[in-house]
Amino acid sequence: VLITQQSQEEMIRVFEENQKLHQDGKGDMAKLIVVSLSVQPILSLAARYNLLADEAAQKLSGYFRKLGADIVLDMTVADDFAILESQQEFIERFRAAEGNGNTSKSLPMLASSCPGWVCYAEKTHGNLILPYISTTKSPQQIMGSLVKYHLAAQLGKKPDAVYHLTLMPCYDKKLEASREDFFNQELQTRDVDCVITAVELEQLLESEGHSLSAVNAVPLDFPWSKIQSSTQSITSHKGSGSGGYADHIFLHAATELFTESEPKLEYKSLRNPDFREVTLERDGKVLLRFAIANGFRNIQNLVQKMKRGKCIYHYVEIMACPSGCLNGGAQVRPQDGTSPRELTMKLESLYQSLPKQVPEKNSVVSELYKAWLGGSQSDKCSSLLHTQYLAVEKMATALNIKW
Ligand code: SF4
């Protein structure tokens, strides 16, 4: 995997070059700069600067606009796509496993939104684990498809005339954006051109002697529909702010596969709070068994179980960081004697205070399925919302690299 152009310096260089083109009357050569804000770093910066979550989002929007961004978005639409696609993929895998005795390695389905985990699986466990990882792209990369292959067209731009920057909770998201699969060879453009983390943004503000609190707030853009444009607010989803979607997939599968109208979500902690399990049972029989495994100790245990053919789960939400993305490696570090755990709890409570988004009820997403993708489960959905994984040896051969 080649990691290039993923730094604050690169971001500032692009903003400055763009500004110069505009000043020199060569605006037609300038890029359209689109910034996508993920919810976890917004909350991290909100806590750092004692702001409300929405206030922090709007001040970040103001900050990026001051740097020269044309459009600033939140990632709710991409999160909703990722949840809906993962739900659908689970149903298909479950039915395939029922039909063929799981010879096609359909289950367990392992989550794919954490590149820390995906890279570890590719490097360490290769083809043994990869068939089980969900093919649904992470929200960051779905946002990449949406910005480069829908928003750009809507605005009469080619994908390579758009510079897409994301604000994320960890450095591994830079690695993800740099994957070959997310690079358009023909147009020589990436779906996500640059990833900036919460801690890098804090450093940038510090180096300029600024506080985010002092930045003017500017509402986020909402180019997907005119209806929400002036009231756009960041949102949360069912479950924790970890960045995973086990709750959604479990509830959807319980209803879709077993016609449970009100399935209960009661997790039991096993071994430690970062390994939890939930089941759907009927007449003493377990119909669905899901787990959430966060942090490398739990991931290693799970992988060992899979290697021995002893994994009992239908789905596992795997996130490399304990407590998931709220505690990401590039979130702002705790201040003033606060412990990491206290900070994560504070971010979790900020997350829970946001208005809840229900992906199935997001009319903008339904409209995008029709207008952009030609319906759900279309070929365009497969190519723009799904990806593939390669064991490192295979990846090295494909890239002609000696490993
Ligand atoms: Fe990044 Fe950690 Fe979230 Fe994985 S769990 S995507 S490594 S912040």
Image: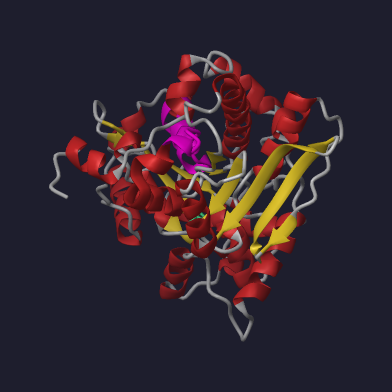
Q: Position of residue 172 (x, y in %)?
A: 41, 55
Residue 271 in the image: above or below residue 394: below
Left or right of residue 177, residue 99 in this image: right
Residue 320 in the image: above or below residue 20: below
Residue 85 picture quarter: top right
Secondary structure predominantly adopted by residues drawn in magenta = helix
353 vs 103, nearest the viewer: 103
Left or right of residue 90, residue 166 in this image: left
Q: Position of residue 70 (x, y in %)?
A: 46, 42
41 vs 213, nearest the viewer: 41
Residue 144 forms part of the magenta stretch: yes
Q: Residue at position x 61%, y 85% from top?
A: 336
Left or right of residue 230, residue 77 in this image: left
Residue placed furthest toward the bottom: 337
Left or right of residue 308, residue 38 in this image: right
12 vs 341, nearest the viewer: 341
* Residue 145 visible in the current orientation: yes
Q: Which residues are magenta?
A: 131-151
Q: Residue at position x 46%, y 30% from top?
A: 386
Q: Residue at position x 47%, y 54% from top?
A: 304
Q: Position of residue 59 (x, y in %)?
A: 59, 58
Coloring scheme used: secondary structure
92 vs 226, nearest the viewer: 92
Residue 105 forms part of the magenta stretch: no
Residue 262 picture quarter: top right
* Residue 155 visible in the current orientation: no
Q: Position of residue 355 (x, y in %)?
A: 77, 47
Q: How many marks?
A: 0
